[in-house]
Image (cartoon, grey):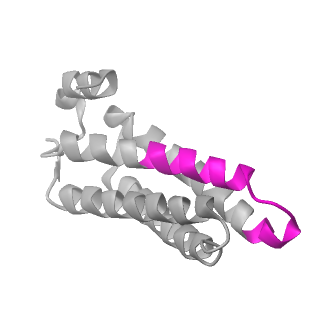
Amino acid sequence: MNTTSQMMQMHEKDMPMDGMNMTMMQECIEACAACEQACTMCAATMPGESMATCMNMCQNTADMCNTMMRMMLRPAGMHRESMMAALQATMTMCAACADECMTHSDMHEDCAMCAEVCRQCAMACQKMMDSMSGAMPAS
């Protein structure tokens, strides 16, 4: 168990929603962190103006994943509807970035790797959303 997981477990009682799956949240945080890093690396390796769309899509996705990750690291401030909207936006951004990167995957291995990490992040966000559907506001 890493430090973040330990800290989240210590503050599980502070969650504004009963029934939150902290393990699922930790997996989503890790997927967002991995996606942020992959997108940042992918954007940094984009050669030339012909790759501007991909580079910008990767940068935007990295920013979105960072924001989503930071929201999950503040469990006491969670608002169900806001979290669901942010998860949905992250999934949408990750899917769009994966699609864009796949158009270059035959020429750039970085793009193929980035696309896969983006898809994994989108799946982790979907699992998190599914787990939140059963969580109820704390009374």
Percent across and percent down for residue 63 are: 61, 49
Residue that appears at 16% across and 42% down: 138
Q: Nearer the viewer, residue 57 or 64?
A: 57
Residue that appears at 27% across and 55% down: 128
Give the quadrant of residue 15.
top left
Q: Is residue 50 magenta?
A: yes
Residue that appears at 46% across and 42% down: 33
Q: Is residue 45 magenta?
A: yes
Give the quadrant of residue 29.
top left
Range drawn in magenta: 32-53
Q: Main secondary structure of the magenta part?
A: helix
Residue that appears at 83% across and 72% down: 50
Percent across and percent down for residue 129 are: 28, 60
Percent across and percent down for residue 49 are: 87, 67
Q: Nearer the viewer, residue 55 or 25?
A: 55
Percent across and percent down for residue 23 are: 20, 41
| 82 relative position to 23: left or right | right
Locate the N terminus and report the quarter of the image it occupies. Answer: top left
How many numbered marks have been drawn onto this rendered protein structure?
A: 0
| 75 relative position to 135: left or right | right
Q: Nearer the viewer, residue 124 or 110?
A: 110
Locate the C terminus and report the quarter of the image it occupies. Answer: top left
